[in-house]
Amino acid sequence: MMEHVGASLIYLLDPFVLAFAGIYAVMALGLNVQWGYTGQFNIGVAGFFAAGAYTSAILTTAPTDNHLGGFALPIVIGLAGAVVVSGLLALLIGLITIRLREDYLAIATIGLAEIIRLTLKNEDWLSNGTRGVFAIPHPFQGMPADERNLAYFVLVAVVVVGLYLLLERARRAPWGRALRALRERESAALAAGKNVDRFRLEAFVLGSAVMGLGGGLYAHFAGFISPEVFEPMFGTFIIWVMLIVGGAGNGKGAILGAFVIWWLYTFTTGLISLAPVKYATQLGALRVMLVGAVLIAILLWRPDGLLPESRDVGGKRK
Amino acid sequence: MLTDILQLLIYGILLGSVIALSAVGVSLIFGILRFAHFAHGDLMTAGAYFALFFMTATGASIWLAFPFAVLAAILVALAFDRVVYRRLRRTRPVILLIASIGVAFILRNAVLVIWGPDITVYESGIKPPMRFLGLRIKEDQLIIIIGTVLLVILLSLFLQRTRMGKAMRAMADDPDLARITGIDTDRVILWTWVIGAGLAAAGGVFLALDTRLQPTLGWDILLAIFAATILGGIGKPYGAIAGAMVVGISAELGAGLPGVFGADWSLTSYKPAITFLLMVAMLLWRPQGLVGGRA
Amino acid sequence: MTLLAAEKLRGGYGGADILNGTTLRVGASEIVVIVGPNGAGKSTALKALVGLVSLREGRIIFGDEEVTGLRADQLAARKLCYVPQEKNVFASLTVQENLEMGAFLRRDDFSARMEQIFDLFPVLKERRRQAAGTMSGGQRQMVAIGRALMLEPRLLLLDEPTAGLSPKFTEMIFTKIVEINTMGVAVLMVEQNARDALAIAHRGYVLVMGQNRFEDTGPALAANPEVAHMFLGG
Ligand SMILES: Nc1ncnc2c1ncn2[C@@H]1O[C@H](COP(=O)(O)OP(=O)(O)OP(=O)(O)O)[C@@H](O)[C@H]1O
Ligand SMILES: [Mg+2]
């Protein structure tokens, strides 16, 4: 038992685990622009995540009859495509829904994410349906597995730090302050004129584009994607839990939350591998329950998260 | 062709019935507690499985298990209200919404842990459908429609005739005014969960009876329930019922009509998308609901 | 005899104080009117009396009991009933159901009281099965006042009961308020129609920036040139 706990703990520092945590951190940073900066309630994260992942996969895989493409383009182009496509998708969705109040936006975005997932599941020509897209190229293809994972983690870490600095800058700029003003007292800012919709749309598109980038990073690391990956639990919900547990509003919270939750989730995998295979599904479900319980515990006892938004720039949310 | 369309209508009413039973609760909770209750679909699932549990434990029929399922779902809802929602009531409603997503995942996965991932049915064996003027309807389906009508009648007697029912409608209209008027809002909230969860369990059992039991039973239909609620106007139980019929019928017609007109493609796998697009159109066009309610 | 005494109220909505030491008193069978410029804190003062605004300072005595910090429903149970300016009826409930909800706190038979209210506002009896949301502004105001009367209050708080009403309805509401007062109910109301309101008031307050500016009998205030200049359009 003890050595299993020990092994599980060491496993947490495995680059493979860290890289996934980092990819989730990218996604949480994107969500933070929407929820943390602007108060937009997007629970269709999975839609943008999927759009990014499939775009990058289709652009970079070798030509095949299984799905659209592949176009065998370089990975950098794939990732850029992921950002552009998910950003455009967000623009389209945003133009329709940006004025909805938060709970309606929630319902609308989760519905759109489900439509995207249904499309990917049913349109074989585009996405190879439930069989998914495989043989997605890895940027460090030739290396042995360990080094490859480590290299990818470094890549992801660089992206996370870069995004953090960039988004933090945007947050402190007049643009970010305007968003915060919108979030805090919408009515007062509304009086300031038509710019409101525009600011909100920009935040929605920016956040979704970052999620798309996360999707692309996911695809090239995992090497295989299918619609199942983008079901609400792992496509959306876990990212929300990460942001809320870490603390919405500042990027540090988003990053911390991503690692804490992914570690918690992975750590329990390690322990569960002790149990008979027969119960694997049940134990997996137990872990999801645990994530749900952590979310509720945080809402009840630490509603501002582990790293609350700093008061100097932010002001506290009500 | 007319028969085909009528047949689709029957399926639409059937789907609408199941949606209606849950949408009433979502609408009341939305109006009274002011948040979109994302765990409602999973409450349906729990209800459906409670019935299964009772049947396997006692060997009783589904109809004996029905009240047990309703009761158990009510207790579950009241427990979550006590432990989670009640303590968040002073925060913003959106926090309650987030919490309800957490509750949804807890409930659904609890079902998975307890009953496993396999798809099951209440009673195996295929019963041939009854035929009537060329239309097909199974006995279970007839029972579902009649059961829904009975439950709706009971609901409306409660809402129109009893002091608590009227208070519930009042609070769904305007929670602040209800409070300052001296209505016992804690009791109204308690009854809202009783009614909402009870009807959700009924809807869950009906849905499982018509299809099959699986852990995502209710979650899969949640968007349709929200669509019905918004169509009917938030806080308006009768509106929700009408909205449910619109959603159910348009989903079945939308999915089935191309085939009736000889198309070689079908939209069946996009049924959720049809209800959903209907809802987004509604949100943009008339967020206060078709007949007007609180926006 | 003083029925309500609110002393030196300070407080607001979380930001800067809106009430800066307001003091209000209402005698047992008085009609008291609060007038003042827009944003003076008149509505806030009423809300503070029924616990809808949190007070930093001050205390409120009703009857012989201190009621500072009690909630609106607790005050309703003590027969202090409040009618907000807007959203003051249950729109999808019928007139009669609105009145029944007003009596929610009563466990006794309130049918006699309902008849009394129907006598006061005969149009409500005619329309008792109509949804309140479908009625005209003046009729909705009657429903709202009627609902508050169901608990047989000793003091009725009214926030601009004539706002947005035609002169005909305005006059009729004021007549009804006098009638209610003669039934033994004290009334504290905020009014924009200052001249008409002061004409029926025993006393009045002029509130400016959350402070008492003037306080006098109704006719005296109406005659005060400074007040007249400020609010009475001349
Ligand atoms: N719910 C609220 N939250 C924050 N501030 C508020 C709220 N309601 C009113 N205020 C502010 O409090 C101040 C006083 O408002 P109040 O409604 O009491 O004025 P009033 O004297 O009733 O004016 P009016 O004649 O316009 O009704 C105003 O500056 C207003 O902006
Ligand atoms: Mg006012």
Image (cartoon, rainbow, N blue to C red):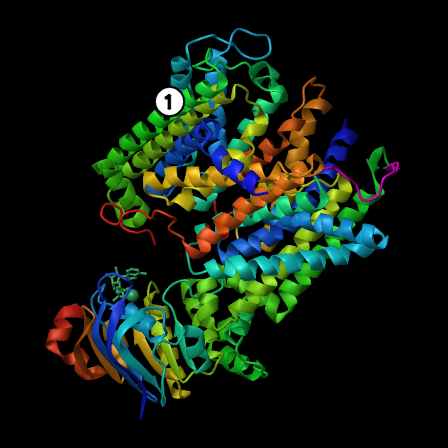
Q: Quick check: can you spot residue A44?
A: no
Instruction: Give, as a three-letter code, the residue at label 1.
Output: Leu
Image quadrant of ligand 1 equals bottom left
Count of numbered badges drawn on the protein: 1
The image shows residue B176 at horizontal and vertical percentages of 44, 64
* Above or below for B172 versus A9: below
Q: Which residue is mark 1?
A: A155
Among the 4 quarters of the image, the one containing residue B65: bottom right
* Above or below for B43 versus A91: below
Q: Residue at x 67, y 50 (%)?
A: B21
Q: Main secondary structure of the magenta part?
A: loop
Is residue B128 highlighted in magenta? Answer: yes
Q: Is residue C93 left or right of residue A77?
A: right
In front here: B242 or A100?
Answer: A100
In front here: B75 or A110?
Answer: B75
Q: Residue at x 50, y 41 (%)?
A: A264
In front here: B244 or A88?
Answer: A88
In front here: B181 or C118?
Answer: B181
Query: Is the C terminus of chain C in the top left, top right, bottom left or bottom right quadrant?
Result: bottom left
Please identify the residue farthest to the left as the structure is shown.
C226
Among the 4 quarters of the image, the one containing residue B254: top right
* Above or below for A46 versus B143: above
